[in-house]
Amino acid sequence: MIKALYFDLDNTLIHRQRSIERYAAVFVECFADRLETVSASRIARIIKKVDNGGYPIAGSAYNSIKQAVAAHLYRELRDSAEVDKSVLLAHWIEYFPKCSVPMPGANQLLELLDQQGVHLGIISNGAQASRLATASQLEKYNTVDQLLSSGEVGIKKPDPQIFQHAMMEAGFAAQQCCYVGDHPINDIQGATSAGMTAIWLQGFHPWPKELDKPQYAITSLAELPSIIFPS
């Protein structure tokens, strides 16, 4: 019986591309006095090109998405705006988490699971401050019992130790826990290696041909209760 349900954050509870679009509108508003006819749609396109669902592109010259975003915005806008790269980086760090858009059905699902007495947690790669700021944009974040970031514990997914750390901290055995995420390796392979039941949220990252197909796969969060509470 599943007693604890853990989630990835970006592209699981939070829709990252829609968040980028919301951020782009805020960006244009904030820098309106320094931009020359730059639209929110153009800003969103620049960011999406390097964001890769929140994962650094292989071979990238940048160690993090935030650095890549700031560098590409600077390069694309330097002919039409007088904005320093450090200002762009600071703006992304401060405002992007505040622009987080919940995944369709995320708040309803959290409320339902909470009513059923399920322990709810988030395990996410990234700095603790940004993970908290992002997750807090969920209307039902108050139902989340536990949030664990790689920045806080010094272990990154897909290392099974970060999943094991979360379970140990909450006092659950692996067979009592389920993990939902969009990334085949960081989320599904990582959680499975830790002994959890893993559920793949499709539509964001393709499944690698060399990996065995996942036991559970869903296309929306609305499908999750039928797996957690089979009739």
Image (cartoon, rainbow, N blue to C red):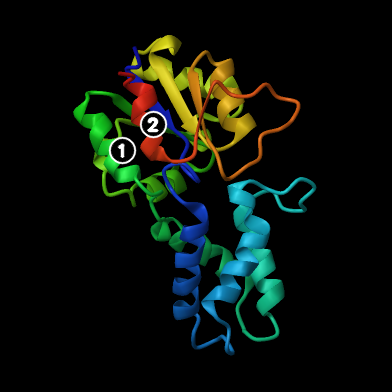
Quadrant holding the N terminus: top left
Q: Secondary structure at mark 1?
A: helix
Q: Secondary structure at mark 2?
A: helix
Q: Is residue 112 left or right of residue 194?
A: left
Residue 206, given in percent of the width and then of the height, sits at: 66, 40
Q: Nearer the viewer, residue 113 or 91?
A: 113
Q: Is label 2 in contact with label 1 (beta carbons under 8 Å)?
A: yes
Residue drawn 39% across the image and 34% down it: 223
Please, is residue 61 above or below residue 33 in the view? above
Q: Nearer the viewer, residue 79 or 49?
A: 49
Q: Nearer the viewer, residue 104 or 89?
A: 104
Residue under label 1: 109
Does residue 16 appear in this view? Answer: yes
The residue most toward the left is 115
Please, is residue 144 above or below residue 198 in the view? below
At label 2, the amino acid type is Leu
Q: Tag 1: Cα neighbours inside 10 Å, few (<14), some, or many (≥20)?
A: some
Residue 3, given in percent of the width and then of the height, sits at: 32, 17
Residue 7, given in percent of the width and then of the height, sits at: 43, 33
Identify the image quadrant of residue 194.
Answer: top right
Q: Tag 2: Cα neighbours inside 10 Å, few (<14), some, or many (≥20)?
A: some
Residue 184, given in percent of the width and then of the height, sits at: 62, 32
The residue most toward the front is 231
Tell me the distance, in whole angstroms, between the alpha carbons under discs 2 and 1. 8 Å
Residue drawn 40% across the image and 56% down it: 101
Please, is residue 230 above or below residue 209 in the view? above
Residue under label 2: 224
Residue drawn 68% across the image and 48% down it: 56
Please, is residue 216 above or below residue 223 in the view? above
